[in-house]
Amino acid sequence: MKVKFTFLWLVLLPALVLGATLNVPAPYATIQAAVNAAGSGDDIVVAAGTYVEQISVTKTLTFYGSNQGISAGATPGSRVAETIITGGFYIHLVSNSTVIDG
């Protein structure tokens, strides 16, 4: 019985500790819809494209665009089509842990 419990704990623990990943535009049609559905600590992955919406964030989230992790500086990596948000992105800080990458 102890082996089964240990195995279940090892399988379930990462799901409890790691946040969910929500994808835009499918299954969430808008970034705000994904924000509304997300729990604190979740990741929102936004595909390349232009999103015309006003986004309001009041929880700790991580946003990844289509060029996540790729430098845009003096020595940029190989970049793909951009994720563009027009209309506004408002982060109402409840902590200093909101991340936007790409």
Image (tube, helix red, strand yellow):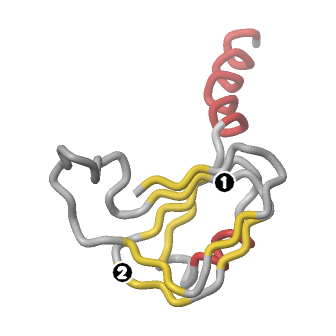
Instruction: Residue 63: give x, y in percent of width and height.
Output: 54, 58
Name the image quarter holding the C terminus.
bottom left
Q: Which numbered tag is attached to residue 49? A: 2
Residue at the outermost front position: 74
Badge 2 amino acid: Gly
Name the image quarter holding the N terminus.
top right
* 14 left or right of 96 in image: left
Locate residue 13: give its quadrant: top right
Structural distance between the alpha carbons of marks 1 and 2 = 20 Å
Note whether 77 is above or below 7 in the view shown.
below
SS assignment at label 1 = loop
* 89 left or right of 39 in image: left
Note whether 14 is above or below 4 in the view shown.
below
Q: Which residue is mark 1?
A: 61
Instruction: Residue 83: give x, y in percent of width and height.
Output: 38, 72
* 16 left or right of 23 in image: right
Instruction: Residue 15: give x, y in percent of width and height.
Output: 65, 39
Tell me the crowding category of disc 1: few under 14, some 14 to 19, or many 20 or more residues within 10 angstroms, Cα based: many
SS assignment at label 2 = strand
Camera-nearest residue between 13 and 23? 23
Residue at position x 57%, y 87% in the image: 87
Going from N to C along the chain, the mark reached first, 1 or 2, is 2
